[in-house]
Every structure is written in structure tokens, then in C-alpha cells.
Image (cartoon, coloured by chain):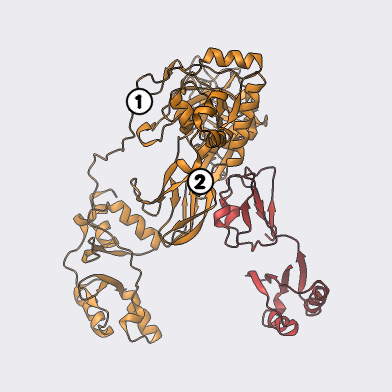
Chain colours: A orange, B red
Amino acid sequence: MNSGRGIETMRSYEEINKKIKHGDVVVLTADEYARLAEDKGWEKASKEVDIVTTGTFGAMCSSGAFLNFGHTEPPMKMYRCWLNDVPAYKGLAAVDAYIGATAMSETRPFEYGGGHVIEDLVAGREVELRAEAYGTDCYPRRYLETSITIYDLNQAILVNPRNAYQRYNAATNSTDRVLYTYMGTLLPYYGNVTFSGSGVLSPLYKDLYLETIGIGTRIFLGGGIGYIIGEGTQHNPGAAMSTIMVKGDLKKMNPRYLRGASIYRYGTTMYVGLGIAIPLINERVAKTAALKDEEIYTDIVDYGVPSRSRPSVRRVSYAELKTGRVVINDRTVRVSPLSSVKLAMEIAYTLKKWIENGIFYLSRPIELLPLDTVFKPLEVRRREPRVFEVMRRDIPTIRSDEDLRNTARILIERGIDHLPVVDDRGRLIGIVTSWDLARALAYGKMRLEDIMTRHVITATPYEPIHSVVAKMERYNISGLPVVDEENRVLGLVTADDISRRYVVRGGIP
Amino acid sequence: MRFKLTFPKELADKPVFSEAILRFHRPFNIIEADVDAEKGVIVASTDLPEDDVMELVKFFEERGVRVELLAKLLEVDLEKCISCGACVSLCPVEAISIARDWSVVFDEEKCVACGLCVNACPVRALKLSIH
């Protein structure tokens, strides 16, 4: 693929820009071009079409803006600062700051954040600026409270370290409870599916091998002009999950395409509108630009598994996702896009009009983006205590036909509060606690089967202790049976065991 | 047709709602119910013909229940809405859908005011009118 990557065999940037100048350039949005290519074949279609415009409008957490406030009288080296109570990064020069999209207001967390500050600035609204300093001989001021607008700032430059994922996972939830994730609200028992990315309009997917997309590529960013300044963080071309880092002048952007957002019980972020014009410079570009929603696949991933490697439930095409319904385990469930296809289309169309009207020219990248970077996980080197180190192994279990008096006797004699109930092969089918026995006494229940809890929260031997503590907190329980892959009981881990072991040593893991 | 009933606390032990069901021989769908120290509130819907609705209102008012007829339960701020669709798959009665032009459209008539969409909206464009 690297051979002749970026080669301009069909048309050059100069030829295209000359056509833009003469007003006879042929531009189609990516969905229009995909349809044309389907009718005529991409070979024919790409002879007629010079440029394909793309667009996406989705939540992009790795976004933010550099701001320069100018100097007050007397001047100040701001050490910490807040915009509408949202902390901005101040590890820069005296009056430079970076406001990140996911920073949350200290007075209205989860409701208002850095993305909202950026939207307010772009909309021309007043924003409260508060700053603290330790005071120096050259910067004596120690405190500042004032209001600013974007017009007061010397520079307001959007710099987003990671935008426009080539494609992204779709999400679902296998567990029995509602999950609140960055992929939105996920209903229990595979109750819905959410996805992000614009499929047929996806900027980076349409130039799949990134032959026209590189450092210096001029783009539509937030309703204004922006540039690609490099590969984005977590750029992962091998998995078709490439990303880009972009910048643009915030002062020339439009709040319609930069929207502060709050994802319920997750946090704040920003919706960013981004579009790239892809010149059909060679046959590979012409071919991938013609890819349809039916040909762009992603995985529906189970966010019910709280791990970085979540299992895929099934493969799915963007075409199927966009029908609004997908089938999971023989059941049809509804689908929510999280990025706006409507705005993505609007962006691709706006970019098309800009080019047709001669106000947007294409730029040849100074350097193409790497194709060999991978997205590595972070291995935790510090030893983390795990369940097998604290669990009790010699715990009794009982069968569900045991009578209550015996059950109580076992709890007392063994000095424990939790008793796993197992079947004849030692597999966990329930749990009974001293509290359950108290309830049996109070309500006159006579059978273990009537009082045991059947839906048992369990732990595994190699699970980190902090994960067990989180489960205890979430489900309001004090002990979990430890089970193997076959659900056979290996032991028990309790809050008492954990606190005895770690609080004494000074420090919860 | 949807209506909101506000019961003063004096009526707490009177089966007024059941009387209405018996009197009008119609099923009522209770969408929401809330009781506090001062009052009880029920939001319900019925398929009573228009002519009988005024009689239903009279029935409740005679018994000291305040009646409000509700046009819609969900208020959508279309200026704010970005048509992302985050709400669509959460709606238990499929009152929210995506139109051919990818706009998100709301059928307020179907809404049962569960509030799932209100929380899920990333740009806070949705509001329940009964709250």
C-alpha cells in the first residue's frame, strides 16, 4: 500500500485548484458519490468527479482551545484559572491557558463544562474569568475576577488532539442494570444499541489509506477553516481507527458546529463539526471514497464488561445501524446514533458549496500520516492486590434443601455471615446470609429456597480488590463468593477480610 | 387525551379514580403518580370521545379534584436539538424516531413522560412539562 501512496495519477492538486478558480470543479458529497459509483461503477464515476466532501458531527472529548487573555494592570502570572467555574490548564506562560472539553464546572459538574465554555465564547457570550497567582516581582497581581468575550482575547485557537475517528465501536449492555457510559445510556439485557461515526460520510474512512489526509490538509472545522496538524492520539490505522489532530481559529467558527454537551452520569464533552474534502487523486482514493454504508463495518461491543477489552457481540454494518434497528440474539433492538448524521450531511454539503463558490481551496499535505502506529494499552506495573490473596478458602457451602436451623448453626459455628448455596456439582446457585435468616424468623419462612438470594454477585480469583470493593459499594453487599469459570465456589471474599488486611497496613489498594 | 389530576390530602382515602373507571366504563392508563404530604398527583390518559371528556372533568371537579387537560408532556427545544438521536433508542413507546432527512422527530401524543430521553439529551433540549 505504501507504494506510490499519495501519487496523483488521476488529477493533481494544481489541476483541481485551477478548476475551483474557474468555477468548473465537480464536487459531490460522499453519499452522492457513493450512489453515483454504485450506478456507474467507481471507475467511471471518478472520471467525472474531482472532489468528494465528507462530514461528521460527534462528541469528541479530546478537544479544547488555547486562549491568550492579554495582561492586566498590574500584570499577573495566572497560576490557576477558571472560565465560568470550569478550570483551565495553566501550566503555560502567564496569560496562556488551555480549556479542555471534558473539564467540568466546579459549581455545576456534569451539567456544564469546557465544551460549553468554548460554545459560549464562539457564540460571543460573556464568560466569567477568575484567576489566582502567587505574585512575583514581575507579576505582582494575585487575584482576578472579570468577564471576557472572545473579542477580548488575543488568540483563541481550537487545538483538538484527537478528532474524527475513522469509525468507532457500537455499544450495547448485557447486564441487568442501566449503564451510563460515554456511549450514552445503555439499557439492560441488550435493550438498545448506540453508535458513533457517520459511516458513508466519515472523513477518514473515505480516504481509507490516508493518501490525501496529512499534515497541512485544510479542513472544515467548527464552521470555520482548520488544518490537520498531525495524527491524532490513539491513531490506529491497522484497526481502521485512524484519528487526526486539528487546529483552527476559534474566532472564525460558528456555535452551530461546536456544541457543549453533557453525557448523563458520565461527564461533559463537546460536539465538533468536522469535514474533509477528498480530492480523487488516484484510483485507490477514488475506490475507497465510494465505499457505502453497507461496506463499512464495526463491532457491537458489550459495555457491560467493565474491562478495556470488551467482547464483541456481533459485527454490524453502518447501513444496518442506520436503519434504526439491529438484531441481537434473535431479538430486534432499537439503535441510537450519538453523532448527528443530519449535521454531518449539512457539513459535507456546506464544504461542497464552499468549494463550488471558490472560497475553499485544497492543500496538498506536507507529510502524510503514519500507517504503522498502534494503540497500546497501559500495563499497571505496580503490584495490585487480587482476590486470591485475601479470600477465605475453607468456607462451608450448603444445598438448597438444607433446613434453616442447620443453616443457622453453620453460620454460628463457623463465625461467618455468608453461606454459598450450591448444586450437586458444587456450582453456585444462591447465597444466604445471617440477615436472610433474621428475615425468615421475622416473616415465618421455613425453607432456604424461599429466603436465599438467587442472583449472586460474584468475584473471580484474579480480580483486583478495588473492583470487588466497587461491587460491594454498588450492590450494597458485604461479601462475594469467589467462583471459577464453571461457577464452582472456590471461596469467599468479605469487606471484613479486606479491611482487616489493608486498613491495618495503611492504605486501600 | 391526557389529563393531570391533583387530589387534595382530604381525598387520600377515597377511591375516586376507581369510581371514575366504573362510571365511564373505560380503561385509563396511569402514566405517572406521585404523592406527597400535601397532595396526590396522577397523570393519566384515556380514549374517551371528546364529548365525554368534559363530563369526566366535571366528575372529578365535583369530588374536589383539580383537573388539567394536557396537550403534550414533552417540550422539545428544536433550536437546541442537534438531531444526534441519543434519545431514540431509549423511548419505551417509540415516540421518538428519525425522519428521512435524519431529523429527530417527536410524537408528543405517544409520550408517557418516563423522562429517559430528558436525561440522555446531551444538549438539554428536552423537558417534561408536568414537572
The chain that hosts pointer 2 is A
Q: Secondary structure at mark 1?
A: loop
Q: Quadrant of residue A118?
A: top right
| Residue on which the image places disc 1 | A1
Q: Residue at x 29, y 64 (%)?
A: A480
Q: Residue at x 52, y 38 (%)?
A: A200
Is residue A326 placed above or below B64 in the rendered structure? Answer: above
- Residue projecting furthest to the left: A394
The chain that hosts pointer 1 is A
Front one among A124 and A137: A124
The earlier-in-sequence mark between 1 and 2 is 1
Is residue B31 placed above or below A314 in the rendered structure? Answer: below
Q: Secondary structure at mark 2?
A: helix
Front one among A383 and A1: A1
At label 2, counting other C-alpha atoms closer than 10 Å, the crowd grade (few under 14, some 14-19, many 20 or more) is: some
Q: Residue at x 30, y 62 (%)?
A: A458
Where in the figure is residue A459, as x and y percent of width and height?
Answer: 28, 59
Do marks 1 and 2 share a chain? yes
* Quarter of the image where the N terminus of chain A is located: top left
Where in the figure is residue A10, as x and y percent of width and height?
Answer: 49, 19
Q: Is residue A436 left or right of residue A155?
A: left
Residue type highlighted by circle 2: Ala
Where in the figure is residue A56, as x and y percent of width and height?
Answer: 55, 35
| Residue on which the image places disc 2 | A319
